[in-house]
Image (cartoon, helix red, strand yellow):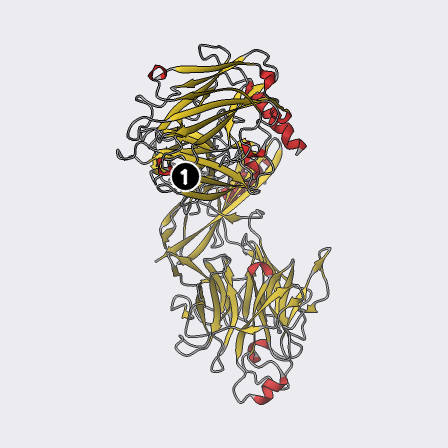
């Protein structure tokens, strides 16, 4: 455990030297928007619980105030997904303090119980407010020390919960962890992670989205579960040891799971889960939820900035004389 | 003779010696093995764990009585083993395990890297079986495996018969061909050689090796050299008398007419049971030229070149794979384009390519994602050095004609870091030659092993190299 934690800290510290941007979803993920549906929506629209939890990590050496930007936080306009009329309200609430991350109910694929653990630092409900159309709304300022200090992460952790409290439309939005109250200035070394990821897929079938669960050294296998994929394409796992393995995909309004063995080489690296759409014009407007557990049933976090970098399979050529 | 004339004479003789072809000489020198005896018969040697296995009796003549056995009250041939220690042959011992019985055993052949033996034995090998049987106690082939506790109880070869003899097994180096001698009906006369091929269901039905191998007289005692040559004994063909030793070569999937090993291997007496080492330079055989069957060692006398190996063809063909990709990986969504570095490209999972000439080539692997259609260039690179094999090289036609001059050329020889001093040719018919390119004419058809020996110098360090190539000469 201690060794694994050390490697983790080293990895984050190492990676922090290179991280200069903090949008959520990140450029590496190539995901257009996160999505949260109003609680009256059908789960077949792609959100099984209408709650999305994201954690933000501020490195302990960062001592300045920070803000959380939410892009297009309201439900309405061109970006969001309408169901009849726009009547959805989404509550964005931001938490810090002890247990905001360490509470087990917060680290879950199905938020129940004490998932709103920690100290509520800010919250705002967004309904149909066109002034926020394609605009950023910034929460803050926040003091980094208000977060829950987690030694193995080497910094302070905060939690953002978006919850569709009414209506049945889909709220599509993005976050940005910024050092400025009015614009997006990245915080070096920061990161964001989630244990279950609900997001919107590109309508363009040539776009491939990625999410990056981190695999520690006690993981020997992972089980991926995905919801409401609508059989619209492929989910492919790529790693430093795996050039691409197709995993089971779900149909409409159901879950599908498959297991993936972890090799020694893959430990302490990130996996690249690629979400690839079929090249079919009819495959549009899809939202999907996904999470990954290890062999103990523990959720593996998806980091928007993959720990250790985007994993790349290294091809090797083997040559032998042909027998004559 | 004045000094000047003497020098001219010596120079003349030296040039005569170097002029090719040179005079014939005995190809082998022989040595009777010290464990051979005058009172008993020793025959059919076989290499085994650094020593020799052979058959021996105590009283009888092998050739007369071997297959004419009722098995009752006769001294049997048994299998012995003898090792060499400090260049001295030690005392022979009976082969261990349940191989030797009161019946005839031997000769023997090792297969499966020494963990399996095939050997000849009477079908009924116990007193009880012999007394009970009303049938002739023919020879059969038996098989035993070596396990942790020793050799297993022998099991009978599937084509043994109480109606005829099946004996003298010999198996090719790759384990896929089995030759044996049999007097089964339908042969060409006496004992013939038969061949079985290994298939999914074991050994195939025996097939007579045909008129180019078998004569109307006896053929027996085969020895499989690698996969395409069989040494064997025959009383027919152009035997000098009794059994002579011949060899047949597989050329284009057909076995050639036999080549007589000639003197001093063959005599007017029985010469049989020859084995030969990988370099074709030394070996052993049996002969009753001194009265009883004895085992002799032979060694090539030509040119002092040792460890001659078969000439390999330059091979510029390679197989290319991605280290962790297999053809049957259904999950593989990546297609490969192999860029072989000589302007040739191939879109396959596992590539194969033959380069036209030696050289250095940079092989690149481009990857095509079959799901997205994206192409990732140069995902891996490999610098391949395509080189000629480093050894002497004989260039000549494989099939030639009796009476016509054949050109032999060593100029394709590839030896690095040495200065070649001399070339020596052994044409396989008793004639030799020198110089980098030479000619020779054969006056008899047959299979000939052409040896090319090279004397070279590497920083005042003399070196010798040798290869051989087999050619056929036809009428």
Q: Nearer the viewer, residue A40 or B299?
A: A40
* Quarter location, residue B237: bottom left
Q: Is residue A296 visible?
A: yes
Is B297 left, or right, of B352 in this rendering?
right
Q: Position of residue B390 (x, y in %)?
A: 50, 38
Crowdedness near tag 1: few (<14), some (14–19) or many (≥20) residues, C-alpha within 10 Å = many
Residue B44 lies in quadrant: bottom right
Above or below, B117 relative to A291: below
Residue behind mark 1: A227
- Kind of element beneath mark 1: strand
Q: Is residue A183 left or right of residue A307?
A: left
Chain to which mark 1 belongs = A
Identify the residue at horizontal 44%, vertical 11% (top origin): A183
Q: Between B151 and B238, which is closer to the camera in this rendering?
A: B151
The residue sitting at 57% across, 70% down in the picture is: B107
**Residue at (45% x, 70% y) in the render:** B193
**Residue A32 placement, left or right of B105:** left
User: Can see residue B321?
Assistant: no
Q: Position of residue A277 (x, y in %)?
A: 34, 34
């Amino acid at each position: 455990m201690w060794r694994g934690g050390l490697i983790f800290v080293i990895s984050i510290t190492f990676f922090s030297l290179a991280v200069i941007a903090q949008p959520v979803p990140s450029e590496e993920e190539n995901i257009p928007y996160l999505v949260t549906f109003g609680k009256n929506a059908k789960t077949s629209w792609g959100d099984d619980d209408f709650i999305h939890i994201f954690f933000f990590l501020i490195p302990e050496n960062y001592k300045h105030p920070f803000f959380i930007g939410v892009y297009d936080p309201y439900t309405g306009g061109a970006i969001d997904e309408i169901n009849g009329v726009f009547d959805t309200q989404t509550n964005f609430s931001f938490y810090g303090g002890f247990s905001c991350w360490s509470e087990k109910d917060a680290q879950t694929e199905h938020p129940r119980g004490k998932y709103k653990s920690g100290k509520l630092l800010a919250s705002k409900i967004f309904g149909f407010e066109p002034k926020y159309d394609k605009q950023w709304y910034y929460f803050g300022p926040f003091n980094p020390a208000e977060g829950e200090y987690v030694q193995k992460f080497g910094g302070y952790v905060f939690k953002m919960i978006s919850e569709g409290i009414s209506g049945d439309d889909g709220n599509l939005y993005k976050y940005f962890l910024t050092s400025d109250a009015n614009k997006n200035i990245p915080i070096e070394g920061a990161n964001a992670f989630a244990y279950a990821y609900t997001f919107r897929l590109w309508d363009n079938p040539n776009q491939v989205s990625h999410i990056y669960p981190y695999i520690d050294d006690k993981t020997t296998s992972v089980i991926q579960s995905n919801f409401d994929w609508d059989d619209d394409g492929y989910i492919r796992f790529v790693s430093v040891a795996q050039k691409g393995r197709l995993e089971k995909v779900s149909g409409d309004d159901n879950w599908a799971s498959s297991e993936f063995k972890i090799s020694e080489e893959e430990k302490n690296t990130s996996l690249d889960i690629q979400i690839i759409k079929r090249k079919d014009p009819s495959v549009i407007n899809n939202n999907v939820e996904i999470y990954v557990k290890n062999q103990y049933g523990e959720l593996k976090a998806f980091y928007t900035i993959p720990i250790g970098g985007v994993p790349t399979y290294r091809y090797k050529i083997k040559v032998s004389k042909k027998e004559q | 003779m004045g000094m000047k004339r003497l020098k001219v004479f010596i120079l003349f003789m030296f040039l005569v010696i170097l002029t090719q072809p040179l005079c014939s000489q005995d190809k082998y020198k022989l040595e009777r093995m010290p464990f051979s005896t005058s009172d008993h018969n020793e025959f059919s040697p076989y290499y085994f764990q650094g020593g020799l296995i052979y058959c021996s009796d105590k009283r009888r003549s092998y050739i007369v009585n071997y297959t004419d056995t009722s098995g009752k009250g006769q001294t049997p041939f048994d299998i012995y083993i003898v090792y060499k220690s400090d260049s001295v042959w030690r005392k022979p011992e009976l082969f261990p395990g349940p191989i030797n019985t009161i019946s005839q055993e031997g000769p023997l052949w090792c297969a499966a890297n020494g963990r399996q033996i095939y050997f000849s034995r009477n079908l009924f090998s116990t007193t009880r079986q012999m007394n009970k049987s009303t049938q002739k106690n023919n020879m059969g082939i038996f098989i035993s495996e070596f396990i942790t506790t020793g050799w297993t109880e022998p099991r009978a070869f599937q084509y043994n018969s109480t109606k005829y003899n099946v004996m003298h097994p010999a198996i090719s180096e790759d384990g896929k061909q089995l030759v044996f001698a049999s007097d089964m009906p339908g042969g060409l006369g006496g004992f013939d050689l038969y061949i079985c091929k290994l298939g999914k269901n074991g050994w195939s039905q025996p097939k007579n090796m045909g008129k180019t191998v078998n004569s109307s007289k006896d053929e027996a005692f085969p020895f499989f050299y690698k996969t395409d040559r069989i040494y064997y004994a025959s009383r027919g063909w152009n035997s000098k008398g009794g059994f002579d030793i011949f060899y047949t070569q597989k050329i284009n999937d057909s076995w050639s007419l036999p080549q007589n090993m000639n003197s001093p291997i063959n005599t007017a007496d029985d010469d049989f049971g020859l084995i030969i080492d990988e370099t074709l330079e030394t070996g052993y055989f049996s002969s009753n030229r001194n009265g009883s069957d004895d085992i002799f060692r032979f060694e090539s006398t030509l040119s002092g070149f040792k460890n001659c190996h078969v000439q390999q063809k330059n091979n510029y063909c390679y197989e290319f794979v991605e280290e962790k990709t297999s053809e049957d990986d259904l999950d593989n969504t990546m297609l490969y384009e192999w860029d072989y570095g000589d302007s040739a490209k191939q879109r396959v999972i596992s590539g194969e390519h033959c380069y036209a000439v030696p050289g250095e080539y940079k092989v690149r692997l481009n990857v095509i994602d079959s799901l997205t259609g994206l192409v990732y260039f140069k995902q891996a690179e490999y610098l391949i050095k395509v080189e000629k094999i480093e050894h002497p090289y004989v260039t000549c036609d494989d099939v030639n004609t009796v009476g016509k001059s054949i050109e032999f050329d060593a100029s394709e020889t590839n030896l690095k870091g040495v200065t070649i001093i001399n070339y020596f040719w052994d044409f396989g018919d008793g004639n030799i030659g020198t110089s980098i390119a030479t000619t020779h004419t054969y006056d008899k058809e047959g299979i000939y092993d052409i040896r090319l020996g090279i004397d070279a110098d590497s920083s005042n360090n003399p070196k010798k190299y040798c290869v051989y190539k087999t050619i056929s000469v036809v009428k």
